[in-house]
Amino acid sequence: MSDLTVNPWKRHGRDRLYVNLPDGTAVAWADRATKVITIKVQKHRVEAVALLRQHLGDAVTVSPPAPATPEPVQRMPAPPREQPATQRAERPLQVPQLTVADDLARNRPGAVLIEAIAARGPSTAQRLWAKALRRPSEWDSWYVGLEGERRVGRELQRLTAQGWRALHGVPKSNGGDIDHLLIGPGGVFAINTKHHAGASVWVGDEMAKVNGGKPTPYAAASKAEASHVQRVLERYCRFTVPVEPALVFVGVASLQRAATQYAVRIYQEREVSALGPLSGQLTPDQVERVFAVARHRRVWLRS
């Protein structure tokens, strides 16, 4: 039991206690108000419940993990069988009314990282102590990534005046997330943010190198992500949705684009404004339709 820790977490009016492994993995959590315990890793069930009872008392209820729904939600219709393009355009699916919990438009840039840090990361006192002692932390890269997503989010916000919509922290059913989706007259862009302060970055068709280091499949991963986004959106929009991948590098000293096919758009953070004038891919009505689908969390989790 000594390997497990209990960490308080508060956000959006929720007050919870998380039970975590030493590596930060959450194995259970409890709602302080209702004293309902949700087990995420069953093999730690007994230890987690015992720990939480020390904080909440014996009058607790243990329930199986299940997504919380604050109000009844109409289910998203299942994707239809493949039909001719003309039929798809004539019979668009209706997206159900959103609950607050399912509306991704409420997400701030870096929303997924913010929640992970709040639930499993160090306390403010621990961060200040480590900073004072100049000790590296396993969470340093998380904070760097969060700052990168916030900076790119600010750049995307500038494009709203030109008819663009931005979403942040779009979940994937495999547990990952898409940093940003930009939706507007120039189509849809799946944006992956990489923060490498002061680094020299080289990007090719599939791989990237930071300070001449080991090749990393940034470009290949971005293309796969954009293909995934297009498949999901077209199942519900019933018209062709053009989706392009984009890599945005934050804080780099230099950026060399060595790609030959330019299948992935590559920018530094301030260059994102180049997307603003793009047009001719989606009509205003189509932009609204794509945005209505894309902002629904359940669309992505069921993909």
Image (tube, helix red, strand yellow):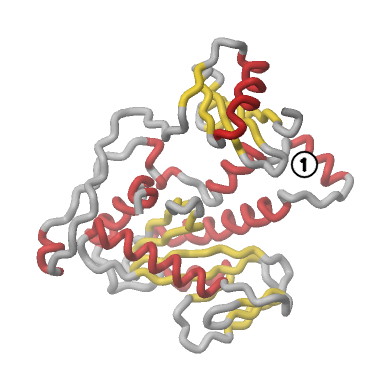
Identify the residue shown where x is 26% and y is 45%: 76
**Residue sitting nearer the eye, 216 or 140:** 216
Q: Quadrant of the N terminus?
A: top right
Q: In the picture shown, does residue 164 fall above or below 123?
A: below
Identify the residue shown where x is 10% and y is 60%: 90
Residue 126 place in picture, x, y as percent: 78, 38
Q: Quadrant of the C terminus?
A: bottom left
Tell me the residue that label 1 is attached to.
127
Indicate the quadrant where residue 229 lies. Answer: bottom left
Q: In the picture shown, does residue 89 fall above or below 100?
A: below
The crowd level at tag 1 (other Cα within 10 Å; few <14, some 14-19, many 20+) is some
Q: In the shown orientation, is residue 86 left or right of residue 56?
A: left
Q: In the shown orientation, is residue 72 left or right of residue 228?
A: left
Extreme residue toward the bottom, this view: 260
Indicate the quadrant where residue 97 lies. Answer: top left
**Residue sitting nearer the eye, 192 or 51:** 51
**Please, what secondary structure does the residue beneath circle 1 have?**
helix
Extreme residue toward the front, this view: 43
Identify the residue shown where x is 51% and y is 31%: 12
What kind of residue is marked 1? Arg
Residue 206 place in picture, x, y as percent: 54, 79
